[in-house]
Amino acid sequence: MLSLKNVSKIYQNGSEVTHALNDVSFDIEPNKVTVILGPSGSGKSTTLNILGGMDRPTSGTVSYNGNLINTESDGQLTNYRRDIVGFVFQFYNLISNLTVSENVAISAQLKGNKYQEMTEKYLDKVGLSKRKNNFPDQLSGGEMQRVSIARALAKSPKVLLCDEPTGALDTETSQRVFKILKSSKNQDTAVVIVTHNPLVAPIADRVIHIKDGHLDKIINNPSPLEVEEVDWG
Ligand SMILES: Nc1ncnc2c1ncn2[C@@H]1O[C@H](COP(=O)(O)OP(=O)(O)OP(=O)(O)O)[C@@H](O)[C@H]1O
């Protein structure tokens, strides 16, 4: 389990001080989809970066299975990011001069997984085996995002962190992406989706509402909807 306890984050640029997060506490659990929901500027990405060990809180603690990660050395934090966390970004962040297959393999290799096997397995899962020798700029946005999900999953992450994963995609493509993300919550993986779109909330087991850097409320959903059951508007 991944836990934030009394986490605050202050950014200071010269004389400008931004209180991005104020005393936020919550847990992220395995085998669940957690949606972090809030308007633009509410602190969602800051929260995700802290959960993923890409940033440290100004105060408060972050722990994974009882071990504090915010007090670890840079090297230990690198291990946490490499071994535990998979990231999916809004604009995919694929390496443009590597093929689809190589983009996925490089991530599995970093973790030491059987990389060829994992690459094939997850490209198949996202339905892109036939595109394995293409380069990212030969793919649509939805296809690129599916490659980035395969890349994240090929590491067998315990925590899959997704920052507005469908922010650049149309509704139909978004549904396909959400279906893949939702099905990834098994195998002990905690799936975390950051979004400003309240329509995503019904597919989650848990929705964490963030407002102006504060935890507004946490809603547990014992019967999350399937992606097909949601009215996407
Ligand atoms: N590196 C930084 N330096 C200074 N201020 C920052 C930095 N990163 C974020 N902020 C500020 O912290 C606040 C929260 O930003 P954050 O990106 O976490 O919000 P968000 O909810 O993810 O927004 P969006 O949905 O627009 O991406 C904002 O006021 C933002 O301007």
Image (spheres, rainbow, N blue to C red):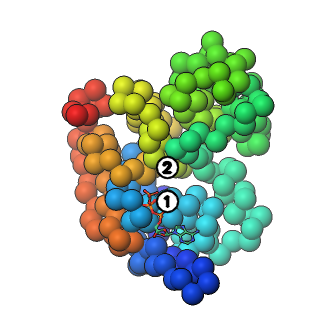
Q: Residue at x 36, y 25 (%)?
A: 172
Residue 152 falls left or right of residue 5: right
Q: Residue at x 52, y 79 (%)?
A: 10
What is the crowding at mark 2: few (fewer than 14 residues within 10 Å), some, or many (at least 20)?
many
Secondary structure found at label 2 = strand
Disc 1 beta carbon < 8 A from ligand 1?
Answer: yes
Which quadrant would residue 177 be assigned to in this image? top left
Which circle's residue, 2 or 1, is located before the other in the chain? Answer: 1
Q: Position of residue 192 (x, y in %)?
A: 45, 49
Residue 54 falls left or right of residue 159: right
**How far apart are the two marked residues, 2 and 1, measured between alpha carbons?**
7 Å
* Residue 108 shows in this picture: no
Q: Position of residue 53 (x, y in %)?
A: 62, 62
Q: Residue under circle 2?
A: 163
Of 123 and 171, the residue lying toward us: 171
Residue 232 falls left or right of residue 141: left
Q: Residue under circle 1?
A: 45
